[in-house]
Image (cartoon, rainbow, N blue to C red):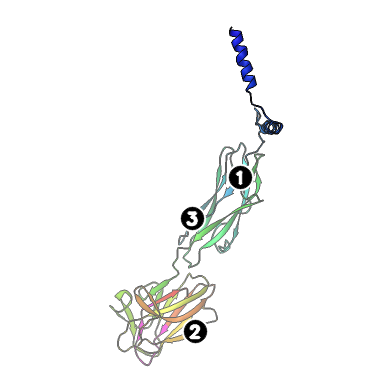
């Protein structure tokens, strides 16, 4: 009985199995073949790839001191540690900074080493301070002649060299002011000193008009060669001259003499809480010094000597 029932059920299932026409069978067969061709094998074939290690160097900067030596550190960095020493040469070159003028200490094909298992090496460059008014200056550090001990190390830029820029940031003000109380001021002859009308309501010098035997001089030093604006300050008091002689020296093309009317209010430029009157724009040569000399040659009144200002235009 059991066998009979099983045979009966089997016949029923065979009779009711899905029937496919030839087109459907072809479609099923194609799909099966596609699956067979694209299936992932048990063992994937992995592409042999070397994980390349790169050597790079980044830009750095340093604020310049007024004197002495500072050290600017560059770092040559590997993207990963390797199993052998990596050596390379380092050289410096001017961009806007000048090694010859004492801005920094040069390196020429000096060899550095990143020890096996380490990832960086420090490159020290000495930078020298000064009080020269100048723009920020730059120099270049270049890595070359890479020897990677067969570790597959390349420069990050994929070239034969790798470079970075060092910036020396100027800390000296482009605006320089010399008051009659400052070290940059000097005088000849007998000038009377008064309080309350000078810069910051402090002292000033006054001389009665005369023969020009007395002078007041403001000396600006440590300037970068270039164009500078010179301006004078005085306060309005009674009896001042309308034609005060000023001689500008230390400039390209030789000395220039100009005259200011001290009976008028100075009004060309505002700085340090007061107004200044322009003497003009002058080209400073490589000496880096510009001087303004005020003379008491003035038959029309007193001469007021207080402060001078220099700045880029």
Q: Answer whether residue 60 is visible to the viewer in this image.
A: yes
Q: Is residue 203 left or right of residue 95?
A: left
Q: Which residue is at 31% across, 77% downward?
A: 203
Whether pointer 3 and pointer 2 mark residues with C-beta atoms closer than 8 Å, the reply is no
Q: Secondary structure at mark 3?
A: strand
Query: Residue 123, how many percent across, how many down?
Result: 55, 49
Q: Which comes before the other along the chain, label 2 or label 1?
A: 1
Residue pointed to by mark 2: 256
Marks 3/2: CA distance?
A: 40 Å
Marks 2/1: CA distance?
A: 60 Å
Q: Which mark is residue 54?
A: 1
Marks 3/1: CA distance?
A: 30 Å
Q: Is residue 129 left or right of residue 275?
A: right
Q: Which comes before the other along the chain, label 3 or label 1?
A: 1
Q: Which mark is residue 70?
A: 3
Q: Residue furthest top?
A: 1
Magenta residues (range): 294-307
Q: Secondary structure at mark 2?
A: strand
Q: Residue furthest left?
A: 196
Q: Answer whether residue 106 is visible to the viewer in this image.
A: no
Query: Residue 106, how many percent across, how many down?
Result: 58, 56
Q: Residues within 10 Å of mark 2 (few under 14, many from 20)?
A: some
**From the viewer's perspective, is the residue at label 3 or at label 1 nearer?**
1
Whether pointer 2 and pointer 1 mark residues with C-beta atoms closer than 8 Å, the reply is no
Q: In this orientation, which residue lies closer to the viewer: 120 or 179? A: 120
Q: Is residue 157 left or right of residue 219?
A: right
Q: Residues within 10 Å of mark 3 (few under 14, many from 20)?
A: some
Whether pointer 3 and pointer 1 mark residues with C-beta atoms closer than 8 Å, the reply is no
């Amino acid at each position: 009985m059991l066998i009979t029932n099983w045979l009966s059920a089997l016949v029923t299932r065979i009779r009711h199995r899905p029937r496919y026409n030839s087109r459907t069978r072809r479609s099923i067969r194609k799909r099966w073949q596609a699956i067979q061709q694209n299936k992932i094998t048990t063992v994937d074939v992995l592409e042999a790839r070397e994980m390349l290690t790169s050597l790079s160097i980044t830009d750095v900067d340093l604020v310049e001191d007024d004197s002495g030596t500072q050290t600017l550190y560059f770092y040559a960095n590997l993207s990963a540690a390797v199993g052998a020493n990596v050596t390379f040469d380092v050289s410096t070159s001017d961009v806007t900074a000048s090694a010859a003028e004492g801005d920094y200490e040069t390196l020429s094909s000096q060899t550095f080493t990143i020890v096996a298992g380490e990832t960086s090496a420090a490159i020290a460059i000495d930078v020298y301070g000064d009080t020269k008014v100048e723009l920020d200056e730059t120099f270049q550090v270049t890595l070359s002649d890479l020897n990677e001990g067969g570790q597959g190390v390349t420069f990050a830029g994929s070239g034969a060299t790798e470079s970075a820029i060092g910036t020396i940031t100027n800390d000296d003000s482009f605006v320089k002011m010399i008051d009659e109380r400052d070290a940059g001021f000097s005088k000849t002859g007998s000038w009377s000193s008064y309080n309350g009308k000078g810069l910051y309501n402090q002292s000033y010098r006054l001389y009665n008009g005369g023969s020009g035997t007395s002078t007041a001089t403001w000396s600006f030093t440590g300037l970068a060669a270039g164009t500078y604006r010179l301006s004078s300050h005085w306060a309005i008091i009674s009896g001042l001259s309308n034609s005060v002689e000023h001689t500008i020296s230390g400039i390209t093309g030789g000395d220039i003499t100009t005259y200011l009317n001290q009976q008028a209010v100075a009004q060309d430029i505002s700085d340090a809480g007061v107004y200044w009157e322009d003497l003009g724009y002058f080209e400073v040569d490589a000496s880096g010094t510009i001087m303004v000399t005020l003379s008491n040659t003035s038959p029309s009144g007193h001469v007021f000597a207080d402060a001078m200002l220099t700045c880029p235009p």
